[in-house]
Image (spheres, rainbow, N blue to C red):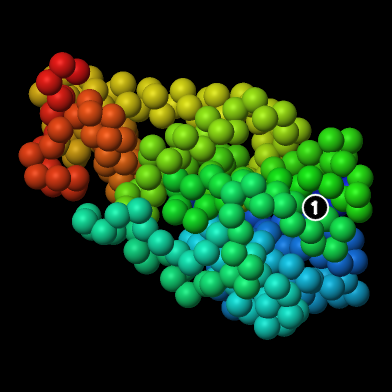
């Protein structure tokens, strides 16, 4: 049964039935507008979910499907939804990775099939049935990640109504975001976290977890969290610990076994960023098996 929740005058939310340690209660699919609808992130392929969603919205027309990024819990259902509705799809292009010289342990998480009808670029403004949007490039978690600012509704500025940003997985409402190279890139992720500092949105609607009603505080907390992780890694290196497995044991004590892999990926991503900043070197390139140490002068 589809449970659609009205979360504001113009926005509804349905959480896809794909709960897990990585998706929390499931992927949030957002329904925007009244009568003529825009859907953000219809979610993964789940038998019966999209037909049930369409049936629950009987009497209304789904005209537009916006995709924040091409991970398998966000974009694959767009194909079935488009077949049932005839809607136009929007996104920042096909799935890509940042580099090809390291193992991609996240390959199966990517939706390599999705291609948007309309490819968006950073700062692009577009309209969907009287709903005004702006695409905001927020890559890092995924190469083609974008967020969507709701700029106006039927020519009424949302500064008085919504003033909302749909942030996908760039900022989540329940945990920090996994950044796993080569699917993700920490330098880009941090750049785009800073990009959303002090932007005066009233609310961030995350793809996992609750709405974020103190956006500036959340961004600041996430930046602090990543810098704390960086400091922990640097301390390990100062103590001669250059192995990712050992770093994870020290920096993530009592971690659930299912989360050890993601913690290792995040550590690798932090190390990649430190290498980019000339603070760390490695004996045989970026990998899980490499040994890492501080660069001279660090």
Is 215 left, or right, of 46 in this rendering? right
* Quadrant assignment, res 91: bottom right
Q: Position of residue 77 (x, y in %)?
A: 60, 72
- Furthest toward the top, the residue is 297
- Furthest toward the bottom, the residue is 83
Q: Secondary structure at mark 1?
A: strand
Q: Nearer the viewer, residue 38 or 247?
A: 38
- Determine which residue is flagged by label 1: 132
Picture layout, residue 67 above or below residue 184: below
Q: Residue at x 59, y 49 (%)?
A: 122
Is 53 left, or right, of 157 in this rendering? left
Picture layout, residue 120 above or below residue 114: above
Quadrant placement of the C terminus: top left
What number of labels is visible? Answer: 1
Q: Specify few, some or many for label 1: CA neighbours under 10 Å numbering under 14, 14-19, or 20 or more.
A: many
Q: Residue at x 82, y 65 (%)?
A: 37
Q: Position of residue 195 (x, y in %)?
A: 56, 33
Is 173 left, or right, of 30 in this rendering? left
Q: Nearer the viewer, residue 88 or 222?
A: 88
Q: Residue at x 55, y 24 (%)?
A: 220
Is residue 259 visible from the viewing direction of this image?
no
* Quadrant assignment, res 33: bottom right
Picture layout, residue 130 above or below residue 191: below
Is 173 left, or right, of 14 in this rendering? left
Q: Position of residue 267 (x, y in %)?
A: 29, 38
Picture layout, residue 3 above or below residue 248: below
Is residue 201 visible from the viewing direction of this image?
yes
- Furthest toward the left, the residue is 283
Q: Position of residue 113 (x, y in %)?
A: 48, 75
* Quadrant assignment, res 109: bottom left
Quadrant placement of the N terminus: bottom right
Q: Nearer the viewer, residue 158 or 172?
A: 158
């Amino acid at each position: 049964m589809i449970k659609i929740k009205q979360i504001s005058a113009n926005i509804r939310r349905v959480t896809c039935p794909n709960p897990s340690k990585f998706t929390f209660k499931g992927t949030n699919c957002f329904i925007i507008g009244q009568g003529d609808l825009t859907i953000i992130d219809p979610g993964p392929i789940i038998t019966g979910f999209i037909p049930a969603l369409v049936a629950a919205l009987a009497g209304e027309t789904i005209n537009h499907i916006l995709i924040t990024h091409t991970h398998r819990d966000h974009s694959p259902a767009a194909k079935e939804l488009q077949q049932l509705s005839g809607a136009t799809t929007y996104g920042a292009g096909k799935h890509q990775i940042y580099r090809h010289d390291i193992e991609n342990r996240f390959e199966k998480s990517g939706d390599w099939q999705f291609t948007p009808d309309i490819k968006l670029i950073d700062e692009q403004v577009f309209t969907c049935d009287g709903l005004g949007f702006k695409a905001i490039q927020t890559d890092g978690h995924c190469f083609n990640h974008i967020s969507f600012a709701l700029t106006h509704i039927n020519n009424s500025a949302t500064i008085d109504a919504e003033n909302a940003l749909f942030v996908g997985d760039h900022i989540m409402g329940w945990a920090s975001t996994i950044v796993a190279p080569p699917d993700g890139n920490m330098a880009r992720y941090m750049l785009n976290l800073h990009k959303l500092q002090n932007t005066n949105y009233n609310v961030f609607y995350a793809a996992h977890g609750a709405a974020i009603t103190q956006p500036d505080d959340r961004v600041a907390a996430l930046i602090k969290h990543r810098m704390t992780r960086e400091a922990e890694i640097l301390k390990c290196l100062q103590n001669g610990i250059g192995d990712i497995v050992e770093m994870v044991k020290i920096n993530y004590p009592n971690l659930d076994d299912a989360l050890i892999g993601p913690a290792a990926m995040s550590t690798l991503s932090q190390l990649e960023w430190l290498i980019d900043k000339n603070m760390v070197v490695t004996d045989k390139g970026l990998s899980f098996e490499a040994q890492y140490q501080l660069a001279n002068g660090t």
